[in-house]
Structures are given as structure tokens and as C-alpha cells.
Amino acid sequence: MEFIDILTEDGKETGIKKERNLVHVDGDWHKVVQIFVINNQGILLQQRALTKKSDPGKWCASASGHISAGEKSIEAAIKEFKEELGIKLDKEDFNLVDTFKSPSVRINNGNKIINNHFVDLYIVNSDIDIKNVKLQKEEVSQVKYYKTEEFCEMVDKKDDRLTDTPILFKNVIKYLED
């Protein structure tokens, strides 16, 4: 059972820890990491496993996950990247480019999922060969590099193949433009 640190709506720690599944039922604010690999091949996206409760089969960040209670953001980023893609990177490979609020509500199989996230957005500038990726099948069905222009067009057109996280994708595009 995974526990999550609960935050106030302005991102301050409350000292409360709660089971992960209850956090999404109650709509509690909490932190997640979103990691994007960006290199001369493009932007590495993962397609979420069809068994996921939220956004099954949709394309999203290279790797992502919740920050467990007591865990540091960078530790969660390293852990999620290794778990989902089977590649161990060092702390220095991750560049924290932004932290922002990303509230959303999803309905999956009739269940309401409230995602009140504070997102720590990490960029990894590394030439990761897809042949070396070992997918965590419970989380990821496949990965693919998208050319930057194609990714930006998908976001601009609100392509329904992408997760419904426009704030996240717009922050990635902002990073690309800077």
C-alpha cells in the first residue's frame, strides 16, 4: 500500500499522509513527477497500458509517477524512470524545469478520478535507444519518439491520442521554445 503526502491547495505540506487510492477519491492535492526525454530524435512518449485507471492507451510523458510519502522529488523521478523504462539514470541526468498546478477530473469505467497534482517537470537530455528500454507492462504498452513539430501539432490540435493534460504539454512546449 502506497502512502502520499497531502498538500494544501497552495502546495504547502500538511503533515497528513493518505493511501494513494483515497487521494484520488477525495481530491487531495499531492505531488507527482513527469519526465520527458528530449534529444535529436525528438520527444520520447509512452503509451499508457490499457489496464491503467486513468487515461488507458493514451500517450504521455516518457515516465511519470506519484511522489510517495517522505520521498524526495528527484528520488521519485529516478525510481519511476527505472521502473517504467528499465533504464537507470543518475540524479545529474534529470533537469527540473518547472513545478506547476495541474488539476483535472477523469471518468474511467464510471469511476471519478480527481487528479489534483503539483507536477515536478523533469527533462532528460539523453540519447536513449528504444531497443534498450524494458517496459513495465502494467504501466506502459509502448514508447515512441515523436518529432518535436509533430508533438507540438498534436498538442495544438488537442489530439485525442494524448492524455488530457494540456497544462503539462504546454509547459513542455514552453521549455522547447526557451
Image (cartoon, rainbow, N blue to C red):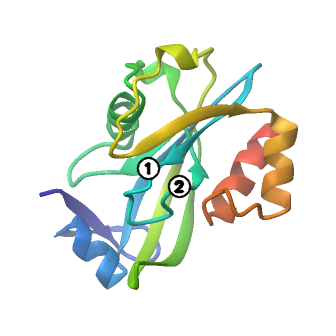
In this rendered view, identify the residue nearer to me: 42 or 167: 42
In this rendered view, identify the residue nearer to me: 57 or 102: 57
Rendered residue at 78%/47% (across/down): 173
Q: Is residue 161 left or right of residue 128?
A: right
Q: Label 2 to label 1, Cα distance in Å?
A: 6 Å
Q: Is residue 178 visible?
A: no
Q: How many neighbours does mark 2 have within 10 angstroms: few (below 14), some (14-19), or many (20 or more)?
A: many
Image x and y of residue 49, in percent: 43, 50
- Do residues under tags 2 and 1 come within 8 Å of each other at their CB atoms? yes
Where the N terminus falls, by quadrant? bottom left
Q: How many marks?
A: 2
Rendered residue at 86%/51% (across/down): 153
Rendered residue at 70%/64% (across/down): 160
Rendered residue at 63%/56% (across/down): 168
Q: Is residue 150 left or right of residue 50?
A: right
Where the C terminus falls, by quadrant? top right
Q: Which residue is mark 2?
A: 57
Q: Earlier in the sequence, mark 2 or mark 1?
A: 1
Q: Secondary structure at mark 1?
A: loop
In this rendered view, identify the residue nearer to me: 17 or 136: 136
Q: Quadrant of residue 162?
A: bottom right
Amino acid, disc 2: Gly
Q: Which residue is mark 1?
A: 49
